[in-house]
Amino acid sequence: MARQPRLTLPDHPHHIIQRGNNRQPIFAAPGDQQKLLDLLGDYAAQFKVALHAYVLMSNHVHLLATPSTADGLPLMMQALGRSYVRWFNTAQGRSGTLWEGRYKSTVIQTERYLMACMVYMDLNPVRARLVAQARDYAWSSHLHYIGQRHDKLLTPHPLYWELGNTPFAREAAYIDLVQAGVTAHQQSQLTAATLSGWALGEADFVADLQKQTVRRVGKGRAGRPFGSGALKSV
């Protein structure tokens, strides 16, 4: 049976995961992470995709982005994947694939899951026990949102701006969100929806999305909203 196309809709945030083939490392030398980010910035601008957040792990990448066109996101990911593999293979004297097939992605409901997704991504290095706190990890967008670094790649989502009336207020509020963490349920929802390609949101949101595409957008029951409860082990 033919696989169905990815769910990609303009003006909606998408959570994206791209993994290394057989979970192999996708960064092998100093400068590899920065090269991928440089390429990502170029292609996001070229294909009119607003990048809200990212985290680069040793063998996979998470992105949170909103395309302004129907084909912007797949074109960006295709160009990024091909260009980075050429760079990586040349630098490492190797050939062949680097990625584990197609990238995974899904549409998420903004009000219900966007901030949860950012927190989930920021805490990925903490869950992997690479660092004790999200602020200790260099290769994510977290430092931008807490005022420790300016990252020109990023376009903060309007929901982030609503966290406070001043930069300090927004940064403090975002720090509180990350310290609160995400629940195990939210974590599994975000992961499962992205890997399966089903839209993540309330029933009305999913029904509205279905009117915008012939591709089936979801199944099952929507989960609980992102709240203030902390996950003890994140």
Image (cartoon, rainbow, N blue to C red):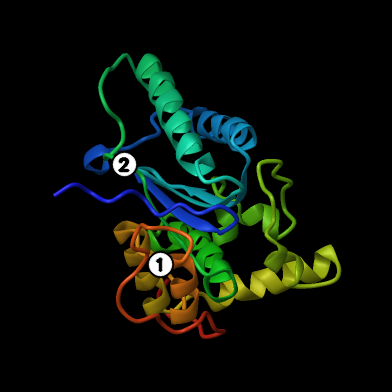
Image coordinates of residue 152 in percent, x first then y, are 71, 41
The earlier-in-sequence mark between 2 and 1 is 2
Amino acid carrying mark 2 in the image: Arg
**Mark 1, residues whose alpha carbon is within 10 Å: few (<14), some, or many (≥20)?**
many
Q: Quadrant of residue 219?
A: bottom left
Q: Is any atom of residue 231 visible in this view?
A: no
Question: Image point 27% across, 40% down: which residue?
Answer: 100
Image coordinates of residue 220 in percent, x first then y, are 30, 78
Q: Is residue 185 above or below residue 82?
A: below
Image coordinates of residue 41 in percent, x first then y, are 61, 35
User: Helix or strand or loop: what does disc 2 sit on?
Assistant: loop
Say whether residue 113 is left or right of residue 171: left
Question: Image point 38% across, 30% down: which residue?
Answer: 28
Q: Quadrant of the C terminus?
A: bottom left
User: Helix or strand or loop: what does disc 1 sit on?
Assistant: helix
Measured in 3D between alpha carbons, the distance from the residue under mark 2 to the one under mark 1, in whole angstroms, is 18 Å
Q: Which residue is mark 1?
A: 190
Question: Image point 54% across, 84% down: which residue?
Answer: 227
Disc number at residue 102?
2
Q: Nearer the viewer, mark 2 or mark 1?
A: 2
Q: Is residue 129 above or below residue 1?
A: below
Q: Is any atom of residue 43 visible in this view?
A: yes
Q: How many marks?
A: 2
Q: Is residue 125 above or below residue 202?
A: above
Q: Nearer the viewer, residue 12 or 231?
A: 12
Q: What residue occupies the far right of the structure in this picture?
A: 166
Question: Image point 57% across, 84% down: which residue?
Answer: 228
Image coordinates of residue 40 in percent, x first then y, are 55, 35
**Mark 2, residues whose alpha carbon is within 10 Å: few (<14), some, or many (≥20)?**
few
Q: Decide: marks 2, 1 in contact (CB < 8 A)?
A: no
Q: Nearer the viewer, residue 93 or 77?
A: 77
